[in-house]
Image (cartoon, rainbow, N blue to C red):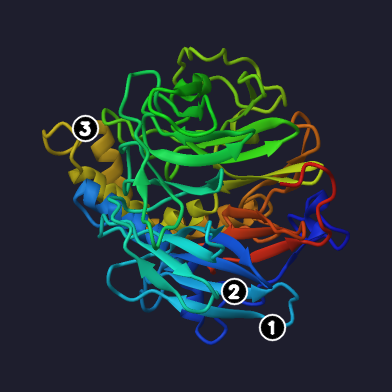
Amino acid sequence: MDKKGNPGIWRGASAFRKITPVRGFDLMNPDNARQNNYVWSMEEMGDYLYVGTARNIVLSVLGFVSEMVGSEIPVPPELEPKDIDNSGEIWRYHKSGRRGWERVYKAPPEPMNIGFRFMKRYTTLRGETALYAAALTPLSPKLHILKSTDGVNWYPLESGISGYSARYMAEHNGKLYMGALPLLGLGETLLFVSEDPEREGWQLVDVDGKPGKNPRGSVDLILSYNNHLYVGTTQPNGFEIWRTRGELPEKDNWKLVVDQGAGDARNEHPWSIAVFRDHIYVGTAIEAAVFSVNPDQNIVPPKGFDVIRIDKYDNWELVVGGKPVVPTNPVTGTRGNPISGYPSGFGDISNAYCWQLQACGDELYLGTFSWSVLMPAFIPLLPDILKILFSMDDGEGTGRIEFSNEELDEMRFILRRPNVRHFLEYLARLVMRSGYRFFGFDLWKTRDGVHWEAVSLNGLGNPYNYGIRILFLSEDKKLYLGTANPFQGCEVWVKRRPCKGVYSK
């Protein structure tokens, strides 16, 4: 608490200030602003900071689940806009703060583009500097990329790439690398490179070689570091980290650095990466907290994220993590006790993602996604959800999931109670009140990678900020923070003082 007793202002949270007067940016249209759920991407060019938004993400996830179970999952009214508009947007902010936010792009209805998952500034060998924004098009498996040289005029490029989105781009030895991803689940290892995306297009990096000598799985992360290219990939038996043995990627000339989820198969996705004090830090996730890429088990119980770090000799160790949920035996190392002393998710099972890692001078910041604030919204809908369970397929093609007679009688009794909805609405309000101080994302920092300090444990004072989707360090060493907030619209914050120290990257 701060000196005035306001909830959720943990220690260093006051070091950040919000620069979005209106959540979701759009001052003139509150319903549209609310649908800008995520600060999904961030980059700078010239005097401006650029943000690519994601639209109605929770609604999209619920639609996917509805297709899986064959019944329409009810949507909490708090998460449903008046007029659904899934067209992604790009906004910009003059870094002086004098001009506010302005929208510079609105996606057309076709193809459906629900937002911009990654944005990268890149200068070609010809000297042309431009922004490249990779979209997510859930109905079109053709990777959609926009380009702008002035930040105002944006136009699509013909990528020729089969893929629904890209999570990462990175410049390495003067070339731009990107991974193409499936909509959900496990995909091919699609790593692309370009010297000029518009004039020369993208070339597929050949990794179709000998087993054990080439990356495998969907490319979630890309990092250029120490004259090597690193990629993080998704696997049903746990994520993997690979690096080139030389400076450039060559078939059959890759080294496996981390395998089998660093000792836990539930660590399927490597979704954050940063270099700090001569170590590479990697944070894990399970998609939407419960969706597994394992074809034998599509839905899994939630777990908190893990964090590992890799030294310059390719040795890895557990930084944050507990007893593995599904133990594995990595060939690249041994899972020991966490050097920080913290279990998975910093002890909070709702911390499903280590969503962002970013060095800031002599400190490393870590931002999470926590699903806890979604619970109150879904509690009143439990009767409708239970009805769906009665008719849900068991995954074996044998029809309805089987319940015992006692379970069926108990659920029918609950559903028949005339006041059950009133009780559940009261329970939802009670849970929200009791959890208000702790719902929302976590923001942590460390000066040595071992000892961690909580900056905020409830979304910088707003528990509806359930995730830190972006931590971005600008050229003038300012740390920007972009939130995910499906209830009210996203926010952007900036650290009040620039980052200081030799580790700012």
Residue 443 or residue 151, whichever sits in front: 151
- Mark 2 sits on what residue? 92
| Residue 127 sits in quarter | bottom right
Residue 416 or residue 95, whichever sits in front: 95
Q: Amino acid at mark 1?
A: Arg
Q: Are marks 2 and 3 in contact (CB under 8 Å)?
A: no
Residue 470 or residue 264, whichever sits in front: 470
> Nearer the observer, disc 3 or disc 1?
1
Q: Amino acid at mark 2?
A: Arg
Residue at the front extreme?
126
| Residue 81 sits in quarter | bottom left
Give whichever of discs 3 and 1 has the lower sequence position. 1
Q: Secondary structure at mark 2?
A: strand
Res 172 label = none
Res 99 label = 1
Q: Secondary structure at mark 3?
A: helix
Q: CA distance from mark 2 to mark 3?
A: 58 Å
- Mark 3 sits on what residue? 405
Q: Amino acid at mark 3?
A: Asn
Residue 415, x across and y down, in percent: 30, 51
Residue 303 or residue 327, whichever sits in front: 327
Circle 2 crowding by C-alpha within 10 Å: few under 14, some 14–19, many from 20 = many
* Residue at the spot 54% in from the left edge and 53% down from the top edge: 373
Q: CA distance from mark 2 to mark 1?
A: 10 Å
